[in-house]
Amino acid sequence: MKPDDSGAPRKEAGAEGAAMLFYEPRHGHGLRHNPFKAIVAPRPIGWISTVDRAGRPNLAPYSFFNALASDPPIVAFASGGLKDSAYNAKETGEFVFNLATVAMAEAMNASSESVARGVNEFDLAGLAMAPSRLVRPGRVAGTPAAFECKVLKVLEVDDLDGKPTDTFVVIGQVVGVHIDPRYIKDGRFDTAAAQPLARCGYHDYAKVTEVFEMVRPDER
């Protein structure tokens, strides 16, 4: 759907004559549901644990999360509004990423409930908390992997007009890595065995149960 002069979406010709849909987000998508998150998918889930200045734990999943660099290892998550995880990370300078898996799907979802500040989502989701070594926030006990992180920056994103979007990006450097040795196979982390969850659009999720390998041309 391509906007006409009124801004309404319309169809346009695509590859080999196929009808494509085009829209400008500022004019609206013209569909029953926004397709953006379903197209940028699957996305790793940032299951983030933090503590506030008083040491009270918080745990919440973020669907906008990913790795940014490997040397040094850097990850980031984005929060719509300065929610507890982003606020705590900004205040204390620390957070932990916990790998969300198929086996922990219900607990992960339970930890997404909107509750008052100071409520312990570990208790809410029936999860045990394991201690970290280099940061104050605890880890989700039983997860195949977790990253202890120190905050590098917290950015409030502005749009093209220079207006605040109320989106805060928390960027952290990984200073400690926990891995359950059961998921190490031939020196590699066995992603398929861990069965990570990924977020798709709407209320949809995906699970990694199978992987395949492709070697880059310059590595052959």
Image (cartoon, helix red, strand yellow):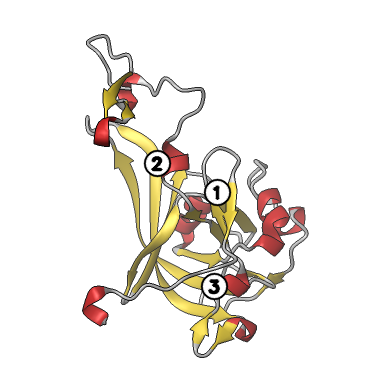
Mark 3 belongs to which amino acid? Thr
| Element marked by disc 1 | helix
**Residue 126, numbered label:** none
Q: Where is residue 139 in the image (x, y as percent from the top left)?
A: 62, 70
121 versus 176 height, above or below: above
> Disc 3 marks which residue?
191
Q: On the rendered image, what quadrant is the C terminus found in? A: bottom left
Res. 56 image quadrant: bottom right
**Residue 84, numbered label:** 1
The total number of labels drawn is 3
Q: Nearer the viewer, mark 1 or mark 3?
A: 3
| Element marked by disc 2 | strand
Q: Can residue 189 be seen in this view?
A: yes
Q: Is residue 53 visible?
A: no
Label 1 vs 2, first from the N-terminus: 1
Which is more toward the observer, 62 or 91?
62
Cα distance in 3D space between marks 1 and 3 = 29 Å
> Disc 2 marks which residue?
167
Cα distance in 3D space between marks 1 and 2 = 13 Å
Q: Where is residue 127 in the image (x, y as percent from the top left)?
A: 74, 63
Q: On the rendered image, what quadrant is the N terminus found in? A: top left
Cα distance in 3D space between marks 3 and 2 = 30 Å
Asked if marks 1 and 2 touch (Cβ < 8 Å), the reply is no
Q: Which residue is drawn at 62% across and 56% down?
A: 58
Which is more toward the observer, 56 or 128?
128
Mark 2 belongs to which amino acid? Thr
Q: Is 131 left or right of 92, judged from the image as shown?
A: right
Label 3: how many Cα within 10 Å (few below 14, some 14–19, many 20+): some
135 versus 61 height, above or below: below
| Element marked by disc 3 | helix
